[in-house]
Image: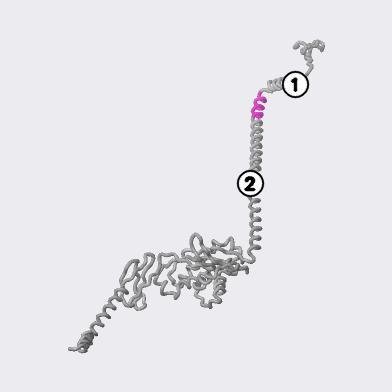
Amino acid sequence: MDMRDLLEQMRQNRRPARIPPIKMGRYAAVIVVLILAAAAVKTSIYTVPTDSEGVIQRFGLYHRTTEPGIHLKLPLGIETATAVPVKKVQKEEFGFRTIRAGVDSAYVGAEEIESGRAPRDALMTVLSESGEKVSSANAGAAAREVLRGEYIMLTGDLNIVDVEWIVQYKVRDSREYLFNVRVPRYTIRDAAQAVMRQLIGNGSVDEAITIGRIEYEIAAKESLQALLDEYEAGVHIVAVKLQSSNPPLKVRPTFNEVNRSLQQKEQRINEAMKDYNEVIPKTRGEAKKLVETARGYAAERVNRAQGDIARFESVYAEYRKAPQVTRQRMYLETMSKLLPQIQEKWIIEQGGADGGILMKLDLDAAQK
């Protein structure tokens, strides 16, 4: 065997053995079965987070609701699982957006938009959340218009106010939340804006900015809940909070001056009412005291006079029983009061001899 035959033999030995077609089909079937089994295992296991419920759809129709944890479902797209956060309080912002939350929070709202201090990346975030599709060249202007459309409102007395508020809500029924409205988040936002604009439009600018904020929050929560219940959206409104409500930025200084004047007016009125409440009751009390004192004095005088009358009548009755004694007593009592007031005293005996006059008895000298 020469070298050429040896090389030819080596070439034939390195040539791979040919697998029969039947074995090739078996190998392919096994590989497909293994792939399908792996896919079935992977798609039949799903996990529901602790703050959510799992909504299972079979061929697109609602089938059941599962609790948090690891569960099994029919694989390969027969059943699909959607986690709905039913325990989480979600929030929608209107008229402003939170760009960065935390200790060093950052917002973009009416004041930043009107003053031109809103950063472009914040405006792009607003635009992406709103779902508007515009060119990148007009993105900033479009985002500004989106926010302006939310916070600019007209009051019932034809004034303009900038209102920023939030809506906090939870999913009450995951089935209704997924299937009764097309896009729940946009439905909530549209309903909230409709309710708030109706309330602001039916009131005055003073109610929207100062005195009616709490009433607006309560009324907005009740009206929004009623509207979403009518839609069967499966949502529970936790709270509606007015973050700020102010006049437009250009007229805000003048409006603040008017408010300060009104506050000073109210302060002066309150001070006057304070003095009134201090002086008037005191004066009324003193007047009542004087009246009661006068009535007491009058009652005392009347009672004393009546007592004197009763005593006089009783004495008079006794005097009438012995007129001679009464006359003698009255004479002596009168003389006892008059004689001490006389400087010189002359005693004349009544019916004396020849009507003569007795010699003067100098009682004063005798006393000395």
Q: In the rendered structure, which segment of residues is drawn in magenta?
A: 311-321
Q: Is residue 1 above or below residue 350?
A: below
Crowding near the residue tagged with mark 2, few <14, some 14–19, many ≥20 C-alpha atoms within 10 Å: few
Secondary structure predominantly adopted by residues drawn in magenta: helix
Residue 201 appearing in the image: no
Q: Which quarter of the rendered picture does the C terminus lie within?
A: top right
**Residue occupying the far front of the picture:** 2
- In the image, residue 324 lies in the stretch drawn in magenta: no
Judging by the rendered image, the residue that carries numbered circle 1 is 338
Residue 215, image x, y percentages: 54, 62
Q: Which numbered circle lies on residue 223? A: none
Judging by the rendered image, the residue that carries numbered circle 2 is 278
Disc 2 marks a residue whose amino acid type is: Glu
The answer to whether residue 365 is left or right of residue 185 is right
Q: Is residue 345 above or below residue 238?
A: above
Q: Alpha-carbon distance for marks 1 and 2?
A: 58 Å
At 66% from the left and 53% from the top, the residue drawn is 268
